[in-house]
Amino acid sequence: MTYSRREFLALTGAAAGLGFPRAGGASGTAWSLLAREANLQLLPEGYPKTRVWAYDGTIPGNEIRIPQGSRVRKQLVNELTEGTSVHWHGIRIDNTMDGVSGITQDAVPPGATFDYDFAVPDAGTYWYHAHNRSFEQVGRGLSGALIVEEPRSPDVDADHVLLLDDWLIDPETGRLAENFGQPMQMSHGGRTGNYVTTNGTYDLTLGARQNERLRLRLINASNARIFALGIQGLSGWTVALDGMPLPTPQPVEDVFFLGPAQRADLFVDVTAQPGETARILRIDRDEAIPQVSFSVTGQGAKVQRSAPAPLPSNPRMAPPDLGSATPIKLVMAGGAMGRMNSAVLNGERKTFRELAQAGYFWSLNDVANIPDTPLATFSVGEPVRMNLTNDTVFPHAMHLHGMHFRAVSDKQMGPMRDTLLIAAGETREVAFIADNPGKWLFHCHMLEHAASGMTTWINVT
Ligand code: C2O
Ligand code: CU
Ligand code: CU
């Protein structure tokens, strides 16, 4: 069963407006990352607890925060009943540490461990999540924030990590809907929930003072939901996307979008008066819903600061040379109401009906499951331009592992990103330098789509 948020609000009634604390109770050592089942108060107080899969027993997993250039060392301890692995999303990582079950490592079996140890070259907002049967493992809660700090902290009064997630949950029982990977979710827009949390909390409320400058690190950890967001009582700039600093901070738009897996770093000044509430709003079917509240108490400064300087550049941000770039093409097809009649599965051409019976609804360049041979092989340092055609009636959030790309329009290159939203019917071009050796996945981050055909890979040798 599903509930619209409006119905849910009606059900929760008086509970709306109550904050509830983030679930705690991490066990293990500082270096361990325990994947296990946990029973947490995800719904507002007074509602039943929810059985989730979580890192260290908390939703989201504990924030990992380290200085740029240092190493993350984490031992994954698998206390789940199925294999798992951890992907460090957006990190330009050593390939062996990328955490993709079946590609860069075997899934870690129940009871076993895996030692992750890697350098983080870039400052910014990243996240970590399970990468085996992600549509279920991430959907059940296996994700957390990974923050890499700039060498000198920027001029802000507070730094808030805001990890947004949605859950398909029955408020009467507190249970997550068990229909992970159901064909309806796979073949349409993916699994979208009826309950949206920030840092595991339904109505996160933070403190702030007038004229303070806040850094907000937004992370979309949901399986498939595209968030439309706005700010109120705040005004400011987007300073980074998908971890990478923008060369020039851009004013925050009235409504901005955050696709699955995408991140945005904002610097916002509190314009609301003491006694008022500033907000991050989520726009859902023309309705603006408070998602995060900032109770403004007192004045932090008499006046606002002037516009922020850009964040310091990360290494290896030079744009690729389009003229010498190797062109490749990717056609995305399939899904409900699409035009895909057939595609190749395990080397054999199958009709759409046969594919659907095998659990596949999408194809990339006519191939419905992750192929044995890469989409393309590049030599280290090769510039690449990729033409992406979305021949489906759904948007997709295309994500490249191990490297960031830039969207190209009119020969102009956009900011470096690791995940790009491509609207239904749209054709986009991205360019990047294949400068990180290894096998790198390229897939839709609507996790149901990734599992049912929209996954391929490139090889950099
Ligand atoms: Cu965040 Cu392959 O994904
Ligand atoms: Cu990734
Ligand atoms: Cu998709």
Image: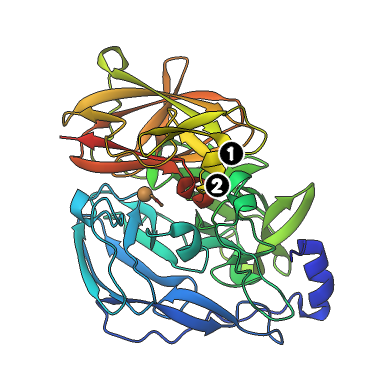
What x and y, as percent, mark residue 113? Answer: 23, 74
Position of 170 with respect to 264 (left or right) is right
Residue at 47% over, 62% down: 138
- Residue 128's label in the rendered image is none
State the separation of the CA atoms marked 2 and 1.
Answer: 6 Å
Image quadrant assignment for residue 44:
bottom right
Determine if residue 231 is in view. Answer: yes
Q: Residues within 10 Å of mark 2 (few under 14, many from 20)?
A: few
Position of 31 with respect to 250 (left or right) is left
Tag 1: residue type? Arg
* Label 1 beta carbon within 8 A of ligand 3: no
Color encoding of the figure: rainbow
Q: Would you say the residues marked 2 and 1 are in contact, meaning their CB atoms lie under 8 Å apart?
A: yes
Residue furthest out toward the top: 323
Q: 413 or 138, which lies in front?
A: 138
Position of 291 with respect to 381 (left or right) is right
Q: Is residue 158 above or below residue 439?
A: below
What x and y, as percent, mark residue 42? Answer: 61, 77
Q: 310 or 116, which lies in front?
A: 116
> Does dot 2 land on a helix, a strand or a loop?
helix
Q: 421 or 310, which lies in front?
A: 421
Query: Which quarter of the image is occupied by the C terminus?
Result: top left
Image quadrant assignment for residue 171:
bottom right
What x and y, as percent, mark residue 245? Answer: 38, 42
Position of 75 with respect to 263 (left or right) is left
> Does dot 1 land on a helix, a strand or a loop?
helix
User: What residue is disc 1 on?
Assistant: 353
Tag 2: residue type? Gln
Residue at 30% over, 57% down: 101
User: What residue is disc 2 on?
Assistant: 357
Q: Is residue 308 above or below residue 3?
A: above
